[in-house]
Amino acid sequence: MSASQPQETVQVGTADSALNPSPDRVREMGAAALEWAAAYLDSIRNLPIAPAARSAELRDRLAEPLPAEGRDFDRLLATFRDIVVEGTRHHGHPRFFGYVSAPGTAVAAVADFLASVLNANLPAWRSAPAPVELERLTIDWIKEALGYDATAGGLFTSGGSMANLTALVAARHRHCGEAVSLHGMRSRPAPLRIYTSSEAHHSTHKAAALLGIGRENVVSVATDDRLRMDVDELAHAVEQDRAAGLDPFCVVATAGSVVTGAVDPLGEIAAIARNHGLWMHVDACYGGFARLAPSARALFDGLAAADSIALDPHKWLYLPADCGCLLYRDPAAVLGAFTLDADYTRILQDEPAEAYAFWDYGPELTRRFRALKVWMTMAHAGSQAIGAAIESNLDCARYFAQLVDAGEDFELLAPVELSIFCFRYLPPFARGRRDITADEERELDQLNERIMVAVQRAGSSYLSNATVNGRFALRGCVLNYRTTRQDMDRLLQDVRAAAAATTEPGVGSGSKGDR
Ligand SMILES: Cc1ncc(COP(=O)(O)O)c(C=O)c1O
């Protein structure tokens, strides 16, 4: 081609190109994707839960140079189906009990698709009036579900870690005013102190590090025999710190701990927070929505007194990632914590509801339209069905605890407070004994770790690990509306089979399970 000949150009902005497909092509892509989605959801119970994937093999199958020219959507969907889906863990499987993982809901998946098509951005009311009103409405529904003040404010976040971080920024702002935002922590005369139980999720410690408060200023308060924060220890720690010239400003209670599901005594912690002028934040990321289940409701008495509550709709509201949520009892107390003036964020509306901006209540500017999937799931299912599903999850965990108690080859390592159960296998030498030696404890830890890996590899059930009172625990969390009592029976069979295989001479491996 000579230099004077026009170059062939790639058609990008014209009708029916890859970036701007015709309505028929959009329909074709959508129909193919929906066909896959319906079949996947229909078959999820029969899939092996965890893939036997290796990084090098996956890379080999996926690797290619950045394509200069586009591919058909069909080819991309085939890669998704044959490599991506085959090579991932299936969190919607009814016997996936690892970590704190929701199954997702079909209606939320559709909502995510619609939200992306609309591509609404929600930094402020003016950017997306109706989506912002929908976020406010769903936040109101969540407040109602939790029994929180109708005047409270809130917003959706990427997850619980972000909600906890954001709450601590607000708490620090109420305590310190603008000085810290302006001058940093060196403007403080004494180290700030945060109190949380020794069972708290590490996102609080991470937030303290990010805020320059420092992880060593997160005081780990001891727990009682149900692994709930010991309130006398809390009061004592605050008084001791005050006397030592330190600066207590916040207590983080946990409503559903990540290890055992323990719910701290919220009412008593609220009284101590009030007496000592502390901001009370509740990390209810795992447990909060269990208030919708009648048998768990009383555990959440006292929640309404919290200054802020972090929740994860992508946990026990069953939504697909990502969606966290933060509620503030007094939104006015937060104003100023995140506010910064700039020309591009100048508010031109007079009506307060229309002058509203999420950027005043959290660190993000561009925000996804997460509210759509929350609204669609809550409105489509209704609070009764969601409450009944949570109640059934609680029942499955309690039923499993009974199964464990009934067999001499297993023991529970912590009480079942919500839907988390921690237990271990006991080989013949350990059964019925209270005098297990330290060496034997180590042997039990190693054996149970091997059993966990064997269960994960077998693919029928999935447990993760925890340390409870220094012991290795097989840990499960029921967080799926598909899970039934029969699944709990099957889980125990699977663990027994893994234990038998692991204790046979020469079988089993000591390698760690991955997350
Ligand atoms: C009690 C608790 N808090 C916070 C988090 C962090 O939530 P996310 O993973 O959404 O950041 C978790 C996650 O499991 C949790 O269980």
Image (tube, rainbow, N blue to C red):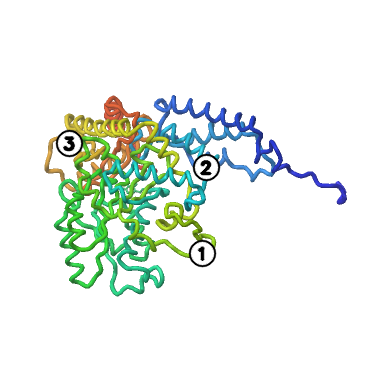
Label 1–label 3 contact, CB within 8 A: no
Which is more toward the observer, 175 or 79? 175
Q: Nearer the viewer, mark 2 or mark 1?
A: 1
Residue corresponding to mark 2:
56
Asked if ligand 1 lies within 8 A of label 3, the reply is no
Residue 342 is tagged as 1
Instruction: Give the quarter of the image for residue 198.
Output: bottom left
Which is more toward the observer, 314 or 498? 314
Point 37% across, 48% down: residue:
325
Spatial CA span between label 2 and label 1:
48 Å
Where residue 177 appears, x then y in whole percent? 34, 68
Left or right relative to 298: residue 206: right
Residue corresponding to mark 3:
429
Residue 256 is tagged as none
Point 36% across, 39% down: residue:
101
Tell me which amino acid carries mark 1.
Ala
Label 2–label 1 contact, CB within 8 A: no
